[in-house]
Structure formats: C-alpha cells, structure tokens
Amino acid sequence: MSAEKFISGTCKGEKCTICKKPATKKLGEEIAHDDPNPIRHNLTAYVCDDHFDMIVRPYVKKSNQLQNKDIKHATTPRKRWNGEPIKRTKYPR
Ligand SMILES: [Zn+2]
C-alpha cells in the first residue's frame, strides 16, 4: 500500500468550495428516509483538507471521547430529576 495520502480522482480539477484551494475530499448530504423526494441526488461539495477537518474533525474527536471510558460524563451514572439513579438493562435484553 502506498504511503501517499489517497485523493479520489473525483477531486481532480475541483476547488474547495470555501477557500478555492485544490479539493482533496468530496462531502455529500445524507438523504433521510423521510425526505419528500428520497430518490433525488444528494447535495455535494468539494473541500480541501483544512476545511474537511474544520467540518468533520470536531465530531470525530467528540465521538472518540464518548467511547473513552475515562471521560467523566460517559461513566457518571445518569439520574432522574429527583436524584434516583436510572437503572438500565444491558444489551441484549
Ligand atoms: Zn478549503
């Protein structure tokens, strides 16, 4: 496998929608099952690495933190409004 970073051929000749640098990623809208026209083509945008990171990385980082058992809010038992702990049944039920 090449050590070079993969850039899809679909990005060739495209510019970042935000800064006009050469595009390295193509983002696409996810069409929800209840969209009034679910068979339409999704909206897309080409972006550079910096703007891809700006859009996607905060969510990737947050998602990774939620999976980290050391994160306080992920391990603190949830409580009801009156302070009683919420008892959850583990999957599979
Ligand atoms: Zn850009």
Image (cartoon, rainbow, N blue to C red):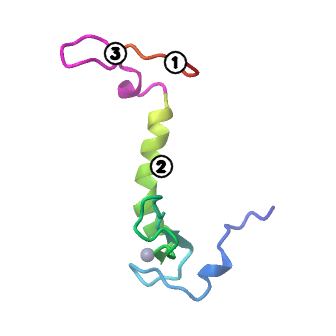
Q: Distance between the residues labelled 1 and 2?
A: 25 Å
Residue 13 lies in quadrant? bottom right
Q: Which of marks 2 and 3 is nearer the N terminus?
A: 2
Image: magenta residue range: 69-85
Q: Is residue 59 above or below residue 12?
A: above
Picture quadrant of ligand 1: bottom left
The numbered mark at residue 20 is none
Crowding around mark 2 (Cα neighbors within 10 Å: few <14, some 14 to 19, many 20+) is few
Q: Which of marks 1 and 2 is nearer the N terminus?
A: 2
Q: Which of marks 1 and 2 is in front?
A: 1
How far across and how far down the image is residue 80, in percent?
A: 25, 18
* Residue at 38% in and 13% down: 87
Q: Say what amino acid the circle numbered 3 marks.
A: Ile
Which residue was labeled with disc 2? 60
Q: Say what amino acid the circle numbered 2 marks.
A: Val
Going by the picture, which residue comes out furthest to the bottom? 13
How far across and how far down the image is residue 29, in percent?
A: 46, 67
The numbered mark at residue 90 is 1
Q: Say what amino acid the circle numbered 1 marks.
A: Lys
**Front-most of residues 80 and 41:** 41
